[in-house]
Amino acid sequence: MGIKGNLRVTRARSWPCVLLVACLGHSLAAAAADPESEQIADLRKELDKSMQMIRELSQKVHDLEARAAQQPAPPAAAPGVTPATPATAQTPAAPAPAAPAPTAPAPAVPPAAVAAAAPAPPAGPTTPETASRLTQLEQTVAQMAANAWQRAEDTGMPMHGFADVGVGTHNAEFPQYQGADIAELDFFLTPRLGERTRALFELNFEVGSDGTVSVDLERAQIGYQFSDSATVWVGRFHTPYGFYNTAFHHGQWIAIALRRPRFIEFEDHGGIMPAHTVGMWVTGSERLGDMKVTYDAYLGNSQRIFDGILDMNNAGVSRGSAIVGGNLGLLPGGVLDGLKVGVDAFQTRIEDQDPTPAAFPQVSPYFTQVKSYGAYAAYDTDRWEDIAELHFFDDTDLTGHTGAHHSDAGFIQMGYRAGRYTPYGRYERGSFQQSDPYFAAQLNGNSYDREALGLRFDVDLSSALKIELAKTSFTDRIIRTWGEALIQYAIRF
Amino acid sequence: MCTGSADPRRAPTRAAGCALLALLAAVATVAAADAHADLPPVRLSDLPASWRDDLGQVFDLHTMQGRAVVLTMAYATCHRVCPVTIRDLQRLQQDFDRRGLTAEFIVVGYDPDADDPAAWHQYRRTRHLTRDNWHFLVGTRADVQRIARQLGFDFWKMDEHVIHDSRIVRFDEHGTLIATYGPAGLQFTQR
């Protein structure tokens, strides 16, 4: 067989493939469109038929009542059919809705009116039969509606999440890299459970400091809502200190800024605070007039330092130490609507499982009692998103070699929403005593400050482009300053 | 149109291209089918009836039958999507006013855990949405999920955030769903 023969064979092989794919595609299309739409169409027809019957029967009832009204009747035998009235019409503060437009066609008989008509007393020899048929029809329609809803409900667990990619003169999280980067793909699973049972799982595919992709179960928490003012969570959750750590999570699409403040980054991205806790968390809110008070209280495994990074001890602790903390917030409401202020504190005992730094007395392992106190304010309105946080650390070296240490960190961020554009600015600073084993043992425990100006542009409702210019300075351990120009494309799905 | 290549070495590539084209056509068919399914076959009387308004009063949604109804869903602390949707609602209201038509404007809260009647009352006051044909409703989680599913409001909760799109639906005086307004301005599909 020559070239032509091969060509014919190739064509003969390719067309069945094309047809197969086309058929498969159309089958998919048909499968996607037909069964559901046919079921809905059938249901629609049945409902329309039933509604038509109801209208006819209602008309008959109406005629019979009209005829009965023309005849003399016993005084207690003929209460009128009460027209449906909006509930708000009964309250002076929420007046009745406006009347239908003058040009509007006459409305169909509302079901409420049918329901009101159903128990009408006998007005003639055929009324009980009519009322009985009406009742049956009502039950049929209600059952059909319930069945339709049941079918609509059965759609499994939805999967949602976030992703972002970027390019810049440095990597936003790991400045040793530059160029293009994939940051994270964050799957967010919220299985639908009972009315009070809650569950939240966040599975994150992220690039680490070594440039490889790893998978992390960022959050895995199951909870029970006792009331609006108390939900108890057990599992791994975002430690509720300050405002940012529980207002913004792994998906960068949700935040105005391109990245989190450095000191409250997640642990494996350079954060020096325990962003995750494995334990129990009680959270809730209570309204007091216009004001709202929020609270969090938590108890969990104390964290450790391993490979220079805080680790939240997912499997439990071996020495029985714990983190305990709380957060109290106030939303004043009224003219200060959008403002939240609060205070927070936690205490934990951190074990450094890495080899002791050379500058420290050679004790292994090091234990540090970390006490953190913080205050925050956030002003979040349709126009402004302003956040400020301040955290103090009073740490004590439990081995008795380096004594007590005081450090602090904070940031202020202002953003202005102007349609699809949100310019923002942020200043952040961390001043961490390097004689404190807690900070000295962490890879990113050095003092720093950073200034950043950025712009978020909402491409559409599910994607945003962010640009940030920043200057970061390390002010101890290694003295270094660098500028950054960063672009990020973040989506949600 | 897919035709055979004179070069047999390119034929597999060509075939793959054709297959991709066919697949895209099929996907387009699915998308077209979805577009036709944009208007859910639901009536006002099919929706959950029992709600509470921003004063905490019982509100029976079925009593809106007989009036034109414009309905959307929102949450009170949303500052990205909901303000746009509310502005679209206000534009619709102005349009109705210009044409001498009346309608009930209903905003159903996505998040009954966070947005109680007081939160909506505050929302109305601060945004001057005080016309008495505007109703801000709070329901049970089950009813909120149900009405969202019935009317095609796709949303999910992430902690205190509600991730959602902008969507407005319109019922006529007979309680028939006649239009949906999409996120891109006031483009809409109409029955």
Image: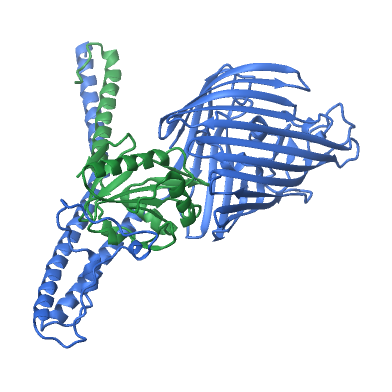
Chain colours: A blue, B green
Residue at 19%, 21% (x, y): give it. Answer: B1
Horizontal side of A190 relative to A379 (left or right) equals: left
Quadrant location of the C terminus of chain B in the rendered image? top left
Q: Who is closer to the viewer here, A212 or A387?
A: A387
- The location of residue B140, given as percent across then percent down, is 43, 59
Q: How many marks?
A: 0
Residue at 52%, 47% (x, y): give it. Answer: B160
- The location of residue A353, given as percent across then percent down, is 78, 37
- The location of residue B103, given as percent across then percent down, is 26, 51
Q: Is residue B52 above or below residue B178?
A: below
- The location of residue A33, given as percent across then percent down, is 24, 44
**Residue B102 visible within the image:** yes
Residue at 77%, 49% (x, y): give it. Answer: A321
**Residue A280 visible within the image:** no
Q: Who is closer to the viewer here, A209 or A416?
A: A416
* Figure quadrant of residue A226: bottom right
Horizontal side of A378 relative to B8 (left or right) equals: right
Horizontal side of A11 relative to A231 (left or right) equals: left
* Figure quadrant of residue B20: top left
Residue most extreme to the front: A92
Residue at 87%, 26% (x, y): give it. Answer: A359
